[in-house]
Amino acid sequence: MTMHLRASHRAGGSRRAGSGLRHGESLAGWMFITPMVVILGLFLVIPVGMALWVSFSDWGGRGSPFSSGVEFVGLNNYADVLTGGGLAQQDFGTSLRNNLWYVLLVVPLQTALALGLAAMVNKRVLHGRGFFRTAYYFPSVTSTVAITVLWMFLFSASGSINKVLSWVGINGPNWFNDPDGVLHTVLGWLGISNGPAWMENADFLGVSLWDWISGPSFAMFALILMAVFTTSGTFMLLFIAALQNLSPEVDEAATMDGANAWQKFWKVTLPQLKPTLFTVVTLGIIGCWQVFDQIYTGTQGGPGKTTVTPAYLSYSTAFNNQQWGRGAAISFVLFVIIVVLTIVLRWAFRERPLPRRQRRYYESLVAKKKEAQR
Amino acid sequence: MSAFAVHRHREFNPRRAAASSLVYALLLALAVLYIFPFLIQIATSFKTDADAASNPISLVPEMWTTAAYRRLFLNSDFPIWLKNSVIVTIFVTLGRVFFNSLAGYALSRLRFRGRNVVYGGLVAVMSVPMVVLLIPKFLVINQVGIYDSYAGMILPLLVDASGVFIMKNFFDSIPVSVEEQARIDGAGSFRIFWSIVLPMARPALVTIIILSFQGSWNELSHFIVSAQSPALTTLTKGVASLASGQLSAGTQYPIKLAAAVIMTIPVAVLFFLFQKKIMNSSEGAVKE
């Protein structure tokens, strides 16, 4: 439809007014996009180039990074962070550890919760559907800063969460001031307070293997719950949209086949949601590696550097410590991490032909359905 | 749905009924879990410090007080933050409505040399994670000489790649015939855009308004790297500094939560006004 109309537009335009109009249109086109090109170019494209230069330089934040006093230092900034063996490397390793645990917990939890909410809200007969959708989605529209402030109250030492925990006899942790790893704490209950020697002695990026498996700190854990709280609503909407696009036929056929609701969900609905699952997991992972606002507002990386994320580390290295080259280098390493993860995900979710057994099952379902209709 | 299926639903089935009430119970419990924090937030903002600390769950203050709000408005920089957020949000929203639709229209309808290159660049720019740009943006804003000014806070936000994309997709989806008639009548491109295209684009413009308003009102990181003076602090930055205890000694949760409440009101109003639109637009975005 659009294609056809556009084709006729082209023909009409050139026949009637000739090159004069064409020229006018070209000029108008450029004038229309100039604001966009200037602003995105100046504040998105050029900055990346400039920061790339800074990441290879020893610029200290004074004057222009292009002034003559600024030296090219090659890969030094990257080496400090990745192989230096000093505090810079250790901080970066710690930030990766923190963020890795954040991703490992937030992404599965938010995806599962969003999917569960969508499946329940999307039930064919449901009273108050609008109310439920609104309730679950509302946290997603509010600002991270406001929610972080609220979260710090809820999870304070004598806050709401610990109050609830005390009802069931649990003495809650001092969440935002507790640097202990959740997994280390659980192992501690089992009597394991030190790792085996090979884990204590070996290290990766300046952090011992034992510390890599510490789990998120209690402070980070509170932020993980917050992320699940604020993002599950958005992803729920994506899943609802996908569910509404599924054809009810396959579902009904499976019902006739004697499948119960649970089996139908896992064997029939979920496989059809794969593209949406890819979108949600990808957006989730990309978002999780960019955690910044809640750290800046709530914890500033503390307690004990257990909530420092690469994004926050890059910011504080540059703006607080004036080590601009190193800060820029960290942000480019983060960029690479995000790009690589996106590519890996795309590969993992690529279109594969269904296994033969499953395909046969679908075909038989559809055939049965048709038979029943006849 | 066939009549057969409808009939099956009407039939009373004890197992189905039990499963259904289980789903309701679960949905309701979750809804309480999602809403309760906000109720606590509002209630606590009307409490005294001591009350907030000793009764962190109760939704009814022992003694209602507006001390937190009075302190914020009469005795702190809060009004300045509010003013700055309003200024920035208005300019950014207006700018995005105009520039995004201008660029989206050109990319969708006008033929000019380099259009495909620009479009490719736009798609590439959209995939750059924003957090990576913190240092880079500061560098350019500083170099250009607009650091610590409204210009530095507003200009970089005036166009957003995803908004241009939304507008382009919208124009791709509406027929070109009306504009063609105007063009034959001799109207110029801008004239056509302004008096024919924009009024037709209302649904998409509402989407842009919602997204820009919410985006710039809630924006934090850009204001951190584009300004530092107290006179240019926005709500997000100011409340973040409150959270880390810059205004007051001690915890003073009522003040912090009161600030968070006020900050949430405009987006909440927008959300409830355009609820249907918001829910459907995110659905529509996926369907395409």
Image (tube, helix red, strand yellow):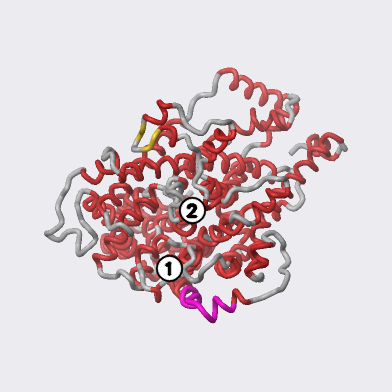
Name the residue located 37 percent from the left edge and 30 percent from the top edge.
Answer: A201
Disc nearer the start of the sequence (1/2) = 1
Magenta span: B70-83
Instruction: Please say if B240 is above or below B8.
Output: below
Label 2 crowd bin: few (<14), some (14–19), many (20+), radius 10 Å = few
The residue where tag 2 is placed is: B173
Query: Which amino acid is tagged 1?
Result: Val
Tell me where residue A81 appears, x and y as whole percent: 29, 43
- What is the residue that sits farthest to the top in this orientation? A357
Indicate whether residue B73 is drawn in magenta: yes
- In front of the other: B14 or A287: A287
Q: Nearer the viewer, residue A156 or A357?
A: A156
Magenta-drawn stretch contains B161: no
SS label for mark 1: helix
- Dot 2: chain letter: B
Asked if one can make out residue A373 in the rendered structure from this viewpoint, the answer is: no
The percent coordinates of residue A261 (x first, y second) are 73, 32
Mark 1 highlights which residue? Answer: B92
The Cα–Cα distance between marks 1 and 2, rounded to whole angstroms, is 26 Å
The amino acid type found where label 2 is placed reads Ser
Judge depth for marks 1 and 2 and give the one in front.
1
Residue A55 image position (x, y, % from top left): 24, 50
Quadrant of the frame with the C terminus of chain A:
top right
Magenta-drawn stretch, dominant element (helix, strand or loop): helix
Seen at 47% across and 71% down, the residue is B85
Is A308 placed left or right of B74 in the picture? left
Dot 2: element: helix
Picture coordinates of residue A133, whole percent (x, y)? 66, 52
